[in-house]
Image (cartoon, helix red, strand yellow):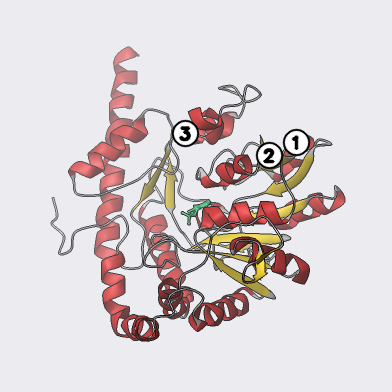
Amino acid sequence: MTTLSKKIQLVDLVSLHERLKPEIDAEMEKVISTASFINGSVVGELECALSKYLGIRFAIGCANGTDALQIALMALGVGRGDEVITTPFTFAATVEAILLVGATPRYVDIDPRTFNLNADALADAITPKTKAIMPVHLYGQAAEIDRIARIACENGLDVIEDNAQSFGATYKGKKVGTFGRVSATSFFPAKNLGAFGDAGALFTDDEELFWKLKMIAQHGAKVRYSHELLGVNSRLDSIQAAVLKVKLNYLDEFNARRRAAADLYDKHLANANLQTPYRDPNGTHIFHQYTILLDEAGRRDELQKFLSARGIPTSVHYPMPLHLQKAFRDERYPKGSLPIAESVAERVLSLPMHTELDEEQIAFIAENVKEFVGRNDESRNSNLSRRA
Ligand SMILES: *Cc1c(COP(=O)(O)O)cnc(C)c1O
């Protein structure tokens, strides 16, 4: 077995930050020396840079991506008795936000290629109670967001894009996060653009909505101690803004590095008995995750153990669709009701993906994946020939 010069990490923020340290330190030092930790001027500078980057009029920093989703729903007046259509195959935060404002999630099963909400099934899920659609751009790739936005428009619904995993990705030449009435993103450290702690942001082109979002994130007040709306405490702190301001300048480079790593994985895994990530030709995939799909349920956990024993960390995004989670259970969605999400959840495996992977590591990971897939195929074939 080959030995590698560098240990393989699932996500490698240490090496990345090593490279950016002088710049980040200087920006953080500015915040520390002025002690303007809350609502410092760097927050406004970052918001301005973020909105320019995305090509949208307004950006509002907030404490994290989960809050961003909840604040978006609050600002749009989504609450008790309302339904929000979303995907069951996402991180829990998407559905938590819907339930926390008192609304009910309605699920649409996923597209078997992109694992994003299937726009073909969307119209059938709309009821008189539907208020909004919350698509997620999963793993770094856009959902069919133009079609989703059109269906929403035809039915008088708002679109809230959960863009936590795809900040910087495009769809038909336009950045995702700019198609909906509002979009939410997360700067959790491991996201493609990550802070040194929790952070998030909201985006909109609508000035009236911008003020609502901004106020709700800061206790519902535009002027201090004058509370016009029911809000929350969800500010983006200045230290995080300072880190993000530096890292935003490198985001396109980070995403290009991820894409280059994905290209190499694709090349090495081209003949393997598994499905590599589908790339929708309408968009650019920024590979928040590089997630393979195995043919059969049951082999994924074995592959994960096999790779782990060889020093290759992996992760499962996500092992259980949200309609089957204890916390979100709803009798309208029993086991078997969203079959594609359920089947995919048993077969996906995310390989190491970050900006610091090198060619040797990717080749090593792919060789080991192929060895496992191949070995199982051989044993299956020999079982078949024994039976024959
Ligand atoms: C990370 C993530 C969130 C939540 O972001 P936090 O900043 O961790 O609160 C929401 N939705 C999706 C799809 C995510 O991946």
**Is 245 drawn above or below residue 211 in the view shown?**
below
Q: Mark 2 or 3 closer to N-term?
A: 2
Pointer 2 and pointer 3: residues touching (CB < 8 Å)? no
Q: Residue at x 19, y 59 (%)?
A: 7
Q: Label 1, label 3: how many angstroms apart (C-alpha)?
A: 26 Å
Residue where numbered disc 1 is placed: 81
**Percent x, y for residue 98?**
63, 43
Quadrant of res 182: bottom right
Observer-nearest of 145 and 95: 95
Q: Residues within 10 Å of mark 3 (few under 14, many from 20)?
A: some
Question: Relative to 246, does residue 7 appear above or below in the rendering?
Answer: above
Q: Amino acid at mark 1?
A: Gly
Q: In the image, 150: left or right of 141?
A: right
Q: Is residue 67 visible?
A: yes
Dots 2, 1 in contact, CB < 8 A: yes
SS at mark 2 in the image: loop
**Residue 361, x across and y down, in percent:** 25, 60
Q: Residues within 10 Å of mark 1 (few under 14, many from 20)?
A: few
Query: Of the residues under marks 2 and 1, which one precedes in the sequence?
Result: 1
Type of residue at label 3?
Met
> Quarter of the image containing the C terminus?
top left
Residue 103, numbered label: 2
Q: Is mark 1 within 8 Å of ligand 1?
A: no
Residue 320: mark: 3
Query: Is 349 rendered above or below residue 355?
Result: above
Q: Which residue is situated farthest in the front direction here?
A: 225
- In whole angstroms, how far apart are the C-alphas of marks 2 and 3? 22 Å
- Mark 1 and mark 3 lie on one chain; the one further toward the N terminus is 1
Left or right of residue 213: residue 3 = left
Circle 3 SS class: loop
Is residue 365 rendered to the left or right of residue 261? left
